[in-house]
Amino acid sequence: MSWAKSRPAGTQAKYRSAEHREYRESLVRDLERDGFLTCTADECVMPTRIITNPNGRARDGLHAGHEDDGITYRGPQHFACNVKDGAKRGRARQGVTRLRW
């Protein structure tokens, strides 16, 4: 629930939702069953698209990637791929021009 206090500091409400937790748990179950998942990021920054680590805090760990709308799930992604994609999209939304000295 969005009012719950049992979340890591800085975690956005959509990542605490039951839907998100269930989706990520289903990805972990798939990973445990199959032994690997394939990264769905447009630009994978890891040496291989294979995901074998369920730890979402590790660089090669499992994240639930979103489409550009931020709501629809794209599929499993490496932590590093997901964070890089989010940073690029966030920077693009800032609409700030580069400094010219």
Image: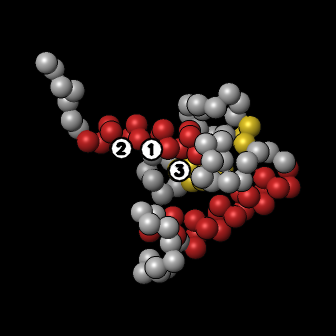
At x 73%, y 48%, the residue is 53
Callout 1 crowding tier (Cα within 10 Å): few <14, some 14–19, many ≥20:
some
Dot in front, 3 or 2:
2
Is residue 75 among the parts visible in the rendering?
Answer: no
Foreground of the two, 72 or 78: 78
As helix, strand or loop, the secondary structure at mark 3 comes to strand
Residue at 26% x, 42% y is: 94
Mark 1 residue type: Gly
What residue is disc 3 on? 66
For the residue marked with disc 3, what is the amino acid?
His
Residue 27 vertical placement versus 68 (above, below): below
x%, y% of residue 52?
76, 45
- Marks 2 and 1 sit apart, C-alpha to C-alpha, by 6 Å
Of labels 3 and 2, earlier in sequence is: 3
Q: Label 2, on which residue?
A: 90
Q: Mark 2 and mark 3 in contact (Cβ < 8 Å)?
A: no
Residue pointed to by mark 1 = 86
Q: How is the protein colored in the picture?
A: secondary structure
Left or right: 80 as drawn, with respect to 5: right
Q: Position of residue 71 (x, y in %)?
A: 48, 57
> For the residues marked 3 and 2, what is the alpha-carbon distance in whole angstroms?
13 Å
Residue located at (13% from left, 18% from top)? 101
- Residue extending farthest left: 101
Secondary element type, mark 1: helix
Residue 60 in which image quadrant: top right
Q: Is residue 45 left or right of residue 4?
A: right
The crowding category of the residue bearing disc 2, from other C-alpha atoms within 10 Å (few below 14, some 14 to 19, many at least 20), is: few
Residue 82 is left or right of residue 3, and the answer is: right
